[in-house]
Image: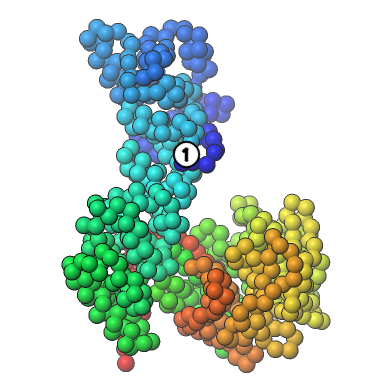
């Protein structure tokens, strides 16, 4: 069920630094996570007395017959249920010896260790024993430690088991974490055998959720079909209810008619066909009016809340830098202009997302070249200033590696630079690291497999096709195979384990070509399908397992066009255009930002308002 790993949860005590009597009782009454509690002292003499059976006045016997001597007052302080059992036994004259028939000796020893030391070791082997003990015997701190361990262990293979376990033992935080993980990783979890172990109510609740992270509604139908066909005798009666969780207005008419309506539990079920009548009419009308936008007010077509939101900030538009911020929802294929009150006009800057923060690095406002860094908190929606870089940098290449932000090369107003800086978010401090082998401005950088890559750019004399790799452990740059084309204003994107160099300017013309490189099988760069629009100085992100290229300059004008690349089919598709023509912009993806019904409803209102605006004459 779990990966082979052991975790020792932090102690609630810290006898080396805390004085007796410093427990924050208010926090304890609120039942907050043990890791956050102010520590108690656990004198070593308690453990010595226990190990030597000194002054022990009670015994606890596990289901396997092992008997453990204890100090009754201590174990009663750790468990209100054990306190009641000891008091009852004492009133009945049964002494201070309790038999716990459903408790293993391992679970009992873990509890006793916790009572005497404030520490316990939670592992994949014992967590299933300790969790029911902690819940049954009312040991909230131990319950929270189990939950904290399981939260760190959640993966696609065990998510559903943990979800069910958390509900059984009433661990609300663990239930929420496991459920959110299930929603965010639904595509992968549907492929696991455990998916079909979900109960009907659990599955229905998940499929109705606005936060369900799916690329298309076809995936919801596929999940329903798999779950029903696992046990058709018992589950066929649930087909109509589950079909009602699917937002058919977002499904292709072809899939609906050739797959959904042909499924045996629909084709042979008049009631199911009647339940799908409204969806059938809706999709038929949309198919007959090819190109008509979907009515987002219709419940059949209400988009799911996106797990990934693209933020595009700044750029060059109408002859000057802009402060516009646009966000993109891939579920609705819509761009929205957001409040940009605190954004200074800036172009040719870097943009990096880290957690809930977006860092805007360097850039140019038409007069000044910046070494400043501004940070946007997507939770509070506030901008703050961060530590400045050593050098001003526009045409800068930025990326994230191992929790650090790197700013590479760029132009300081006089020189094209080879220097590289590394930002420590926790210390809010920049440091210089080894410079690149070439001066590069208007290049592009990304990280892949623990290494940093930079490609192309302009050195002040020529457009470059060279590519360098940085090993942070050795603080050293080395060359790898050069690209097929020289490219400045290029985008370098990590995708499906490879590097993709897209678009740019070769010194003569803007390019619509792209090429890829596989670091696991070093060799020449290979060409991929061409984009529809040539472009340089554009933004690129990976969303919904596709590369999106956004805006840029086509050699004549700035453009709002957006295309997305499907690597599985080596094909480009058009996406919704931005609201503003611009180049020299930058973009990043924020994941899992929407949490809480209030945020969900806010986004839905924006989607609906967008639809109304498009319908106005």
Residue 574 image point, x, y percent:
50, 82
Q: Residue at x 51, y 19 (%)?
A: 43
Q: Pick the residue in front: 387 or 361.
A: 361
Residue 397 in the figure: left or right of residue 264? right
Q: Nearer the viewer, residue 376 or 541?
A: 541
Residue pictured at 24% horizontal, 51% vertical: 234
Q: Position of residue 114 (x, y in %)?
A: 45, 25
Q: Quadrant of residue 353?
A: bottom right
Residue plotted at (69% across, 60% down):
520
Picture residue at 38% right of the left edge, 87% below the top:
291
The quadrant holding residue 170 is top left
Crowdedness of circle 1 by 10 Å Cα count: few (<14), some, many (20+)?
A: many
In the displayed structure, 358 sits above or below 277; it is above
x%, y% of residue 198? Answer: 33, 50
Q: Can residue 612 be seen in the rendering of this structure?
A: no
SS state under label 1: helix
> Is residue 529 or residue 494 the one in the foreground?
529
Can residue 544 be seen here? yes
In the shown orientation, is residue 269 left or right of residue 314? left
Q: Residue 568 in the image: x percent, y percent?
A: 55, 70
* Location of residue 337 with respect to 290 vertically, above or below: above
The total number of labels drawn is 1
Colouring: rainbow
- Residue 401 falls in image quadrant: bottom right
Kindly identify which residue carries mark 1: 149
Image quarter (top left, top right, bottom left or bottom right) of the C terminus: bottom left
Q: Is residue 547 above or below residue 82?
A: below
């Amino acid at each position: 069920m779990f990966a082979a790993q052991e975790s020792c949860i932090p102690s609630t005590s810290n006898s080396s630094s805390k004085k007796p009597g410093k427990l924050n009782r208010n926090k304890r009454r609120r039942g907050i996570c043990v890791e956050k509690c102010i520590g108690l002292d656990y004198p070593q003499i308690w453990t010595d007395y226990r190990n030597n059976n000194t002054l022990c006045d009670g015994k606890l016997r596990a289901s396997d017959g092992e008997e453990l001597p204890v100090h009754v007052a201590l174990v009663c302080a750790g468990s209100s249920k054990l306190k009641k059992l000891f008091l009852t036994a004492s009133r009945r004259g049964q002494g201070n010896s309790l038999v716990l028939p459903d408790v293993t000796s391992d679970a009992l020893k873990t509890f006793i260790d916790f009572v005497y030391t404030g520490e316990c070791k939670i592992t994949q082997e014992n967590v299933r024993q300790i969790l029911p003990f902690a819940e049954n015997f009312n040991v909230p701190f131990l319950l929270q430690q189990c939950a904290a361990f399981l939260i760190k262990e959640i993966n696609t293979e065990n998510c559903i088991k943990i979800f069910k376990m958390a509900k059984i033992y009433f661990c609300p935080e663990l239930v929420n974490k496991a459920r959110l993980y299930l929603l965010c990783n639904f595509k992968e979890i549907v492929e696991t055998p455990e998916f079909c172990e979900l109960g009907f109510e659990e599955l229905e609740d998940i499929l109705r959720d606005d936060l369900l992270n799916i690329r298309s509604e076809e995936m919801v139908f596929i999940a329903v079909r798999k779950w029903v066909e696992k046990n058709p005798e018992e589950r066929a009666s649930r087909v109509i209810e589950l079909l009602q969780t699917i937002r058919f207005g977002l499904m292709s008419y072809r899939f609906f008619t050739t797959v959904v309506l042909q499924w045996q539990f629909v084709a042979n079920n008049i009631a199911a066909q009647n339940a799908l009548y409204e969806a059938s009419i809706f999709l038929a009308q949309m198919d007959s009016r090819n190109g008509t936008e979907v009515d987002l007010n219709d419940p059949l077509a209400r988009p799911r809340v996106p797990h990934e939101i693209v933020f595009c900030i700044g750029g060059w538009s109408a002859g000057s830098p802009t402060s516009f911020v646009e966000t993109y929802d891939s579920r609705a294929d819509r761009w929205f202009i957001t409040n940009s009150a605190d954004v200074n006009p800036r172009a040719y800057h870097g943009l990096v997302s880290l957690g809930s923060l977006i860092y805007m690095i360097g850039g140019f406002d038409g007069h000044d070249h910046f070494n400043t860094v501004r940070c946007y908190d997507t939770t509070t929606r506030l901008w703050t200033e961060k530590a400045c870089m050593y050098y001003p940098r526009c045409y800068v290449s930025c990326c994230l590696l191992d929790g650090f932000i790197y700013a590479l090369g760029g132009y300081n107003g006089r020189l094209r630079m080879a220097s590289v800086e590394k930002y420590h978010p926790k210390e809010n401090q920049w440091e210089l690291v080894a410079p690149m082998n070439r001066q590069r401005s208007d290049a592009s950088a990304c990280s892949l497999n623990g290494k940093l890559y930079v490609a192309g750019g302009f050195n002040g004399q020529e457009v470059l096709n060279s590519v360098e790799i940085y090993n942070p452990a050795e603080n050293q740059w080395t060359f790898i195979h050069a690209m097929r084309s020289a490219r400045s204003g290029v985008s370098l994107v990590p995708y499906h384990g490879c590097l993709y160099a897209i678009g740019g300017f070769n010194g003569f013309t803007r390019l619509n070509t792209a090429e890829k490189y596989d670091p696991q099988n070093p060799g020449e760069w290979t060409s991929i399908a061409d984009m529809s629009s040539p472009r340089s100085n554009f933004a690129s992100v990976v969303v919904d397992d596709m590369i999106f290229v956004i805006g840029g300059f086509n050699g004549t004008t700035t453009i709002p066009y957006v295309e997305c690349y499907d690597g599985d089919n080596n094909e480009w598709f058009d996406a919704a255009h931005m609201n503003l023509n611009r180049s020299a912009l930058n973009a990043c993806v924020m994941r899992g930002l929407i949490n809480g019904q209030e945020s969900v409803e806010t986004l839905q209102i924006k989607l609906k308002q967008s639809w109304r605006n498009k319908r106005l004459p």
